[in-house]
Amino acid sequence: MSKVIAAMVCVSFLAATLVCGCATGPKGPTDQELVTSTITGLKDAVLAKDLEKIMACLAEDFYHPEVGDKAAMKDLAAQGLDMIDMSTAEVDLANMEVKVEGDTATAYPVVASASLGSVTVSLSLKKEKDGVWRITTGEAEGI
C-alpha cells in the first residue's frame, strides 16, 4: 500500500511541475514594460496636475540644457501646470516606441496637446539603483 501512495505522490509532483512550469517562478516585467510604466505614470501625473508624482518620474540627476536641473524643472512644471486647461489636454502614447540599451532607454514619440498647442517629446531614461526607470532628459519638437 505504501508503494501506491508513493507512486501517487510522484505522479502528483510531476503533474504539478508540468502545470506550474519551472521552479524559478514567474518572471517580472521587462525593462521595456517598466519604461512604458514610467511614461504612463508621467502621463497620468500631468493630466492630474500632480507635481510631486511628475517629479518622482525624474532622475535626481535630471538635466536639460534649456531648463537646468531637477529643481529648475520643478519650477517650470509648476508654472506650466498653472497655465494649462486640463479639460482640453491629452497625452498620446499610442505610437510611442521604447528602445532599451543596457541601463538607458529612449521613448518617442510622446505627443502632448492642449488648448495652447501641441508638442512631440523624446524622453531619455536610466535604470536607477532601486530598479526604477526615471527620466534624465528630453527633447521637444513643435514648441
Image (cartoon, helix red, strand yellow):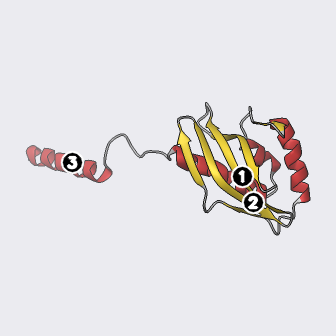
Residue to which mark 1 is pinned: 121
Q: Which residue is mark 2?
A: 112
Tag 1 secondary structure? strand
Q: Amino acid at mark 3?
A: Leu
Q: Residues within 10 Å of mark 3 (few under 14, many from 20)?
A: few
Instruction: Please tell me which residue lies in front, 6 or 19.
Output: 19
Horizontal relation, residue 61 to residue 86: left or right: left
Q: Position of residue 114 (x, y in %)?
A: 81, 65
Residues tagged 2 and 1 counted as in contact (Cβ below 8 A) = yes
Amino acid type at mark 1: Val
- Residue at position x 39%, y 43% from top? 25
Q: In the rendered structure, which amino acid carries the disc numbered 2?
A: Ala
Q: CA distance from mark 2 to mark 1?
A: 8 Å
Q: Residues within 10 Å of mark 2 (few under 14, many from 20)?
A: some
> In the image shown, does 141 or 36 lie closer to the viewer?
141
The dot on residue 14 is: 3
